[in-house]
Image: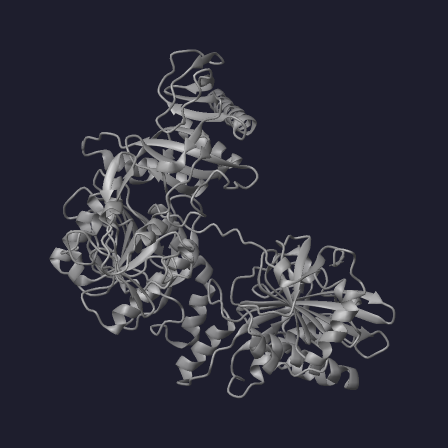
Amino acid sequence: MLLTVCYAYLTFTAASRAARRKMKILNLVRQYALTSGLSFKSGKPEYLCHLTQEISASVFWEETPASQKYTEVVLWREDDNRMTIIEPKPKVDLDEWTSFIGSARPLTPTTRVRSGQVLLLLEATLPDREDDGKGDTCEELLLSQSVSLTRLSEPLAWRSGDPYGLLVSTDVEGLGALGLAFMDSKLKLDDGMEAVQMISVDTSGSSQDLLLLYARKLKSPGQNNSGDNDKDFGGSTFRLELPKLRRGSTEVEGQVLGGETPKVRSVQDSGQAEDGSVQGTEDTMSGEFDEQDSPEMLTKLQAKPPNILVYTGSKDTQTERSKFDQVKEVLEQCLGPDHYIIYRLKHDQVLSHPWADNTSLLVAVTQEELEDSVNQKLESFVEDGGRLLSFCSHFNMGLDVQPLPFLSAELGVHSMVYRPLQGSATELKVYVTGLCYTPRLRAHQGSTAFKVVGSMKSGNQPVILHAYAGYKGGRAILSQVHLEMSPTEDEVKGAEMFTQLKKSNPQRYQVLQDILTTLGMTCSRGTQTTLTPSHLLVVEDALQDAVVQAISSHLDERNVLRGNKVSLLFVDDSEVTPATPEELPVLIGGAAESFNCQVYQDNLKTRTLGQVVLYTEVIPTTMTVLDRLSSCVPEDTGLIAIAHRQTSGQGRGGNVWLSPLGCAMFTLHVRIPLQSELGHRLPFIQHIMSLAVVESVRTLPSYQDLDLRLKWPNDIYYGDSMKLGGVIVNSSIMGNNCCAFIGCGFNVNNSNPTICINDLVKQHNKLHDTDLPEFTTEELIARAVTTMEELVQEFQDNGSDNFLQRYYSRWLHSEQKVHLSSEAGPQATILGLDDSGFLSVVKDGGEIVSVQPDGNTFDMLRNLITIKT
């Protein structure tokens, strides 16, 4: 008993000491990170804590004036690591640095770092290692405890040399976590490098953007300006090769010294016009990897460029090209825009081209047997420090595979459990190859170690492995399940298989992002989106003058219409000012590139609703911009606010509605006379809008079988399994009218990570051998608004009976058994909507109860109606 008490005491004391240490270090980071050069270093200092000492500048810092020296104070030290502050705060001259492709921009002195963020300089070296036969085991044990730099920061720029310089952006809390990892010797860098110092810095000068530099060196045929082709980066002179870029049907050839012009696809179209200027147009890369695709300059800079190669097998048919497109799409969605350049590695290039040194990640995806020479090349790539992701049944780093024992002759969808190196396990449905790895996870030869990170739920057979190869930091993820496969691919047969994979799609992307991060890739953390001005578009020309005159009479001296949360600043095209969350510039008319007004107008068949459009490319939410405008325009004017993208979309009960591209997002203003059928039953408004969305699709000829349904109180569903839209209503009383602002969002063309209406169209075409056209957001918004006006008018003329008949034909709940409040609560049967629009249920004892939508939600998985939290 005494030993138990002593052990508990010692455990508590150790945990308490560790917690105090962690809090002390984090408090020091919060105190000094933004104002001083806060540094974490390895190596014992020659002086005690809290004494000020002069120090020499790092090779990356700008020199100080002779009268001002760098000084250092040690705040904390443990063993060979220490935490210090350096004054003045070091500044890094970026003129000899190179921006990472995919970083927000080349760094300049005017670059704005978001409030609370820190620029962090890391100095790293590649340590000497001896292969003692234990490195792999030790590294595997430490990996689960390590802290990855890429998880807590965004890479911005780099400079080659010894030490290697890396500039990243993080926040104060991220720096605290990185600092703790450094002090504990758990900070993990890619490619086996070790950080010897990291310090918060300021910057000057401008870093090089390789893609822009590359584009500017392009010359028209016949020119030979060879003197410009040598550029010095950090003392290393390299030759800049001039490629041929194809943009659509346009080809621009460059003169290459000492050889013929190499071919390359545009890695990131820099938009070079005929006059050589850079316009920044969209990427039109075809994605084929040719011999000179990776600029030779990058191999001389001792850092791998952000190239990802995809190998699809020995053939070059449409099947292999489609497979490349499939993999490229899913990688871009996981990695985010502009981070990496993705090429196809053809079979004849595997052995004949020097691609390995210029590749950050190789993705192998084929079910054919690999030639021995190809297999050896891929294994050598990993053993030499490369990173590889394999969806190949027959590339297994020397492991044996065997058939999954529970499979029938037909391959299909099965449950898998993914266990990441850090974090909790994830269960998901996956399409299997039919094979798994044998329990004996030892390669026939070599020093590769393996760790199981994915196994089948039924039988626990290993299907995803993390391979640690050699002593140069090589890594591979080997998968016998098709994580790269979209639920809409041809291999997916039948509605049940499609639905199972669609339900697991968010988990599939989560697993893929974890795998890519494990392999050292930088996955998207979301992009900072700039708000944009709005366009006020009037569908009927005859209405425009009346609307503009009505608005003009309510503007102040700055032409501002002041609202409760958002004010509208009406401007001319030449006066456009930046949009903010509080003030939105509005242009009368004009063309909005991302909104096809003609398609909207062709599909809008209303007398009032939706006739005046406030369209915004990027806006926080459409729910806050119409309140003041609605009181200014004539009463017979139907306002609608439409967004291409929202940054803070609103859901019911304070929830956030994710608003990806391809989602229809709008707020519709509807006036309801209080002394009317609908005015007496205002809760029906959200049900009418939900039904309008479903009917806008299912009433079209040939689309009636698309399984769009209604879930109480305000959700739009695919079948009974997946949500693809919802409705929120805010209302106020003005005189004798109820002014309802109906917010609606539903997925039209955003297949990932969940499901959209066009997914259902594609699936219908595949199952029924039809060719139904897909929808646009403009088309379905207009059709939904048109149907909304029709349903409102029918309700006003005939009451709720006809509406309820149509509503019940689309909803999911007739005679459904539910529990109220909790799983132990009273059981009841759903009857329908009552006369007020509330949910009507009958308890087992016969008592009829009405459940209001506000504050309650329906958990269909558990048949449970609970208070919404």
Q: Which image quadrant for residue 455?
A: bottom left
Residue plotted at (86% across, 77% down): 675
The residue nearer to you, when weighing 215 against 477, is 215
The colour scheme of the drawn protein is one colour
Percent from the top left, x then y, of residue 841? 71, 71
Question: As drawn, is 110 to the left or to the right of 217?
Answer: right
Question: As drawn, is 180 to the left or to the right of 450?
Answer: right
Numbered label tally = 0
Percent from the top left, x then y, of residue 179? 45, 30
Question: As drawn, is 383 to the left or to the right of 155?
Answer: left
Residue plotted at (12% across, 56% down): 373
Q: Which image quadrant for residue 635?
A: bottom right
The residue nearer to you, when weighing 859 against 849, is 859
Percent from the top left, x then y, of residue 342? 32, 57
From this viewpoint, which residue is outermost toward the bottom? Answer: 701
The C terminus lies in which quarter of the figure? Answer: bottom right
Residue 259, above or below 826 = above
From this viewpoint, which residue is outermost toward the left? Answer: 373
Q: Is residue 406 visible?
A: no
The residue nearer to you, when weighing 649 against 726, is 649
Q: Which image quadrant for residue 286?
A: bottom left
Residue 684, above or below 202 = below
The residue nearer to you, when weighing 645 against 178, is 645
Residue 560, above or below 776 = above
Q: Is residue 304 visible?
A: yes
Percent from the top left, x then y, of residue 239? 22, 45
Residue 398, above or below 324 = above
